[in-house]
Image (cartoon, helix red, strand yellow):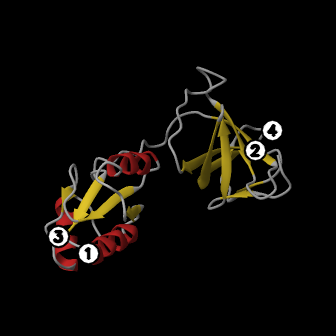
Amino acid sequence: MHEEPLEAGKTYLLKQTSRVVRAEVKRIAYRVDVNSLEHLDATELKMNDIAEVEFETNLPLFFDAYRENRVTGAAILIDPLSNATVGALMIDRAVRTVTRNDLPALLAAAHIDLAERLRELLAAAGHRAVVLHGFTPDEVPVAVRALQLAGVLAIVAGAVEGATVLDATDDAGLIAALAEMGVTV
């Protein structure tokens, strides 16, 4: 629905019902030839193309398949710079459901430098993580929950209730502790 082609790697705003999230085009599975209905390889989509596309959103979407509910199964793509509607979507299914089974919502390291290093190691492994600074013990659970909803892991320095404590004093110890959780860095 736009002059600019849709390509893998581009990020748009995806509006589904009243919710707006960031959505990155992860993969164009195929483009449909409208004359033969044949599935064709595609690296980009031009105006009026129909395709199966996989997106990764920065926040979870709560949806039904379009064939079950047209209201919660439909969405539009919006260019974040021009605010132009660039595509219309019919949601078929979740390609994968993101779970946090591999890591708890809150990790604790012995001190701030180790917490920062843990964040770097997790980022290198493809996990989004932040180190919490300056939160009171009462504020930590609220911050952790907000980060968890955004798919971001919280890390603190020192012992905090509810945190999985990594008993490590260096990179090798952090890497070993993460490996025990099934995370390769």
Q: Determine whether the residue tagged by mark 1 lies in a helix, strand or loop.
A: helix
Report the residue that reaches farthest toward the top.
68
On screen, 62 above or below 20?
above
Quadrant location of residue 48?
top right
Q: Tell me the distance, in whole angstroms, between the alpha carbons under discs 1 and 4.
A: 59 Å
Question: Label 3's element?
Answer: helix
Query: In front of the other: label 4 or label 3?
Result: 3
Residue 181 shows in this picture: no
Residue at point 57%, 27% (across, down): 65
Q: Is residue 184 above or below residue 54?
A: below
Above/below status of 184 relative to 32: below
Label 3 sits on residue: 176
State the image coordinates of residue 124 (x, y, percent, origin top left).
38, 72
Q: Residue type at mark 2?
A: Gly
> In the shown orientation, is residue 177 left or right of residue 71?
left
Distance Cα–Cα, label 4 vs label 3: 56 Å
Question: Callout 4 environment at 10 Å: few (<14), some (14 to 19), or many (20+)?
Answer: few
Decide which of tag 3 and tag 2 comes sooner along the chain: 2
Q: Mark 2 sits on what residue?
A: 87
Could you tell whether 163 is left or right of 39 in the image?
Answer: left
The one of 157 and 126 positioned closer to us in this rendering: 157
Classify 10 Å Cα crowding around label 1: few (below 14), some (14-19), many (20 and above).
many
Kind of residue at badge 4: Asn
| Residue 146 visible in the picture | yes
* Of the two numbered discs 3 and 2 in the rendering, the one whose residue sits closer to the viewer: 3
Q: Disc 1 residue type?
A: Leu
For marks 1 and 4, give the one nearer the viewer: 1
